[in-house]
Amino acid sequence: MAEWGGAAESDLKAAGAEALPDGRSGVRLRGWHIESSRRPILGSLALQEWEEKLGTSHLPEMVFGESSLYLLHEDSGIKLHFNAFDALKGWKQESLPPVEVPAAATWKSRSKPFQQVILDYDYTFTTPYCGSEAIEPNTEKAILEDGCCSLCWEDSDQRIDLAALSSKEPILFFDEVVLYEDELADSGVSLLTVKVLRIDGVLMRLRDTRVYCPFVSDHKSMPAILRESCWREATIQSLSAVCSCSLYVHEGFPSDSAAYGDPNLIGQRLPVITHKTQRLKVSRSITGG
C-alpha cells in the first residue's frame, strides 16, 4: 500500500530534525510536523456511509479511507493534508464524462438488457483534488489572536525552487501513500497517489500536484507555501503514432499500455491541458469589542 523511509539518526540531528516517536511514520523539522499513516481498505459498512455522504453508488474497488499524509506548521497551526474522502468529493463534483474503452462495445453486445454495463459516470475516478488545508484547533492561537482567519489559494507568479529540491542534502523522510485504487474491470488502472491514471489502450491522464514548503530558520515565521498543479492528457493512439518533421523521423511510444506505468517517464510527452501555481493566503477578519 505504501513505501516510506527515513534518514539515519545522525543525518536527522545534523539537520535539526527528529523522527516521530512510538514507531510513527514522520519527522519534526524546523517548526514542521510531517506525518503519514497507512490503514487497511475500508469495509462494506464504511463504504456504504461514504456512498451516502458522496451521493453515489460507485466507489473504487480499494479505498484506503483512513490513510493520509499531512504537514503541520506548528506555530501558525496551518495544516496541509491529503485524504481519500476529499479526493472523491472532487471526483463527484467534477463529473467528467466516461471514457469509452474498446471492451465497452463487447460488454453491451454480450449482456442481456438487465445486465448491460451502463457507463454513465467517470469510472476512472479522475479527481482535480490538490490537497486540503485547515487550521489545527489546538495550535491556532498564534494566527488567531488578532481575529478570525481563513485559508485560500491565490494565483501566483512565484515558482517552486527546483534548484533547492535538487540539492545533494540527504533525504530526511520520504513516503508514498495510496488513497484509492481500481483496476477498471481489467481495462487499466486508476491509482490515486494524487498523480496518475491509465486506461489500457485508450488514454493516458496525469494529474500532478506539488506542494513546496520551505524550512526556514525562523520557525515562528509563516513561510510562503506554493502549490503547483498540472493536468496532462493524450490518447494512446496519439502517443504511439509515428512523429515526423523536416529534421527527423522517429517512432512514437509503444501501444502496449504496460509501457506507461511510470508517470515520470511518460509525463514530458503528454500535452498540458491546464497548469497553474498558487500561493496559500491567510485572510484575517479583525473583531473588536
Image (cartoon, rainbow, N blue to C red):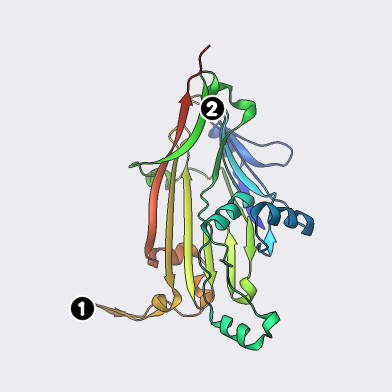
Residue 27, image x and y in percent? 61, 38
The reply to whether dot 1 and dot 2 touch (C-beta < 8 Å) is no
| Residue at the image position 51 percent from the left and 67 percent from the top | 97
User: Residue 135 versus residue 35: which sits nearer the camera?
Assistant: 135
Callout 2, which amino acid? Answer: Ser
Which label sits on residue 246?
1
How many residues crowd around disc 1 within 10 Å: few (fewer than 14), some, or many (20 or more)? few
Residue 151, image x and y in percent? 50, 35
Q: In this rendering, is residue 237 above or below 145? A: below
User: Residue 241 versus residue 83: which sits nearer the camera?
Assistant: 83
> Hey, which residue is sitting farthest bottom in the picture?
110
Tag 2 residue: 76
Q: Quadrant of residue 164?
A: top left
Callout 1, which amino acid? Answer: Ser
| Residue at the image position 67 percent from the left and 83 percent from the top | 113
Residue 128, image x and y in percent? 50, 55
The span from disc 1 to disc 2 (Cα, nearest Å) is 57 Å
Q: Earlier in the sequence, mark 1 or mark 2?
A: 2
Q: Quadrant of residue 254?
A: bottom left
Question: Quick check: 111 left or right of 81?
Answer: right
Of the residues tagged 1 and 2, which is closer to the observer? 2
Which label sits on residue 166?
none
Question: Quick check: 281 left or right of 12?
Answer: left
Question: Quick check: 85 left or right of 230?
Answer: right
Q: Secondary structure at mark 2?
A: loop
Quadrant assignment for the N terminus: bottom right
How many residues crowd around disc 2 within 10 Å: few (fewer than 14), some, or many (20 or more)? many
